[in-house]
Amino acid sequence: MIRQVRIHREKFLLREETDMIARPMRWLIHPLNRSGRVLFFGLGLASLVVAAALPASAASLTLTWADSATNEDGFKVERKTGSTGAYGQVAAVAANTTGYVDGSVTTGTTYCYRVRAYNSAGDSAYSNEACAAPVSATLYTVTVGKGGTGSGTVASSPTGITCGSDCSEAYASGTSVALSVTPAAGSTFTGWSGACAGTGTCTVSLNQSSSVTASFTRIRR
């Protein structure tokens, strides 16, 4: 059986939980707002983690936290620069969310974060503070050359190479770059050399800078 008693000018809810023979077992006190709605308990301490990952194109920091709130409307994410900056809200995310990616950061700068849950009754306590600095990716260059008596173009996925006009591009370490060819009218593609071979799509997995040549042959009529 649960008996509820309001105390301290309706700021708290006192719950008496009893067993089957009506002996008191424990008392639980929950804060209330003015409308009588029970405020949730907030995020657990030491629950927020910030991690820096090698970016493909831009620096970012990934936040994760434990959602120990039970009736939140969402979470507010606050950030400050360095240990002496002032906190300001950078995002509000939906209920039951347990992570956020901050892409508006600069490589080499330390950022600190804290998170709290909210609903119409108010805000929870803050999580612990967690800090990290985004790191820069190691970049490797893919260089495309063209050879033979014919002509054509080479394009990449991810984008960056259109050779044609742009035959070299830097990508983050670990990126797989797929190169495809389009022979010009009157030409045929005869194969790759360098980092690739054969006549299919050339895929370069970058752990070092790589060069590849696409050969085209003019079709005789």
Image (spheres, grey):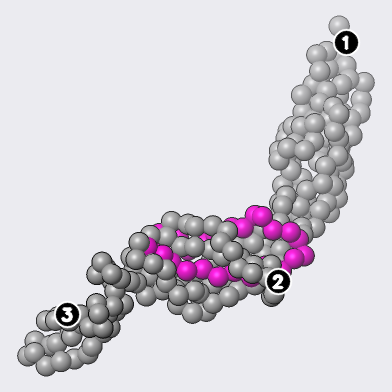
Disc 2 target residue: 82
Residue for point 19% across, 91% down: 25
Residue for point 51% across, 68% down: 115
Disc 3 target residue: 4
Residue furthest out toward the front: 9
Tell me the element at label 2: loop
Whichever of labels 2 and 3 marks the residue nearer the N terminus, that label is: 3
Tell me the element at label 1: loop
| 148 relative position to 21: left or right | right
Which contiguous range is marked in magenta? 95-119
Residue for point 71% across, 40% down: 158
Question: Residue 194, image x and y in percent?
Answer: 87, 41
Question: Residue 2, image x and y in percent?
Answer: 14, 80
Picture quadrant where residue 192 is located: top right
Amino acid under label 1?
Answer: Arg
Mark nearest the camera among 2 and 1 is 2
Picture quadrant where residue 151 is located: top right
Does residue 42 belong to the magenta stretch? no
The quadrant in which the C terminus is found is: top right
Disc 1 target residue: 220
Amino acid under label 3?
Answer: Gln
Judging depth in this view, the residue of 14 and 178 nearest the camera is 14
Tell me the element at label 3: strand
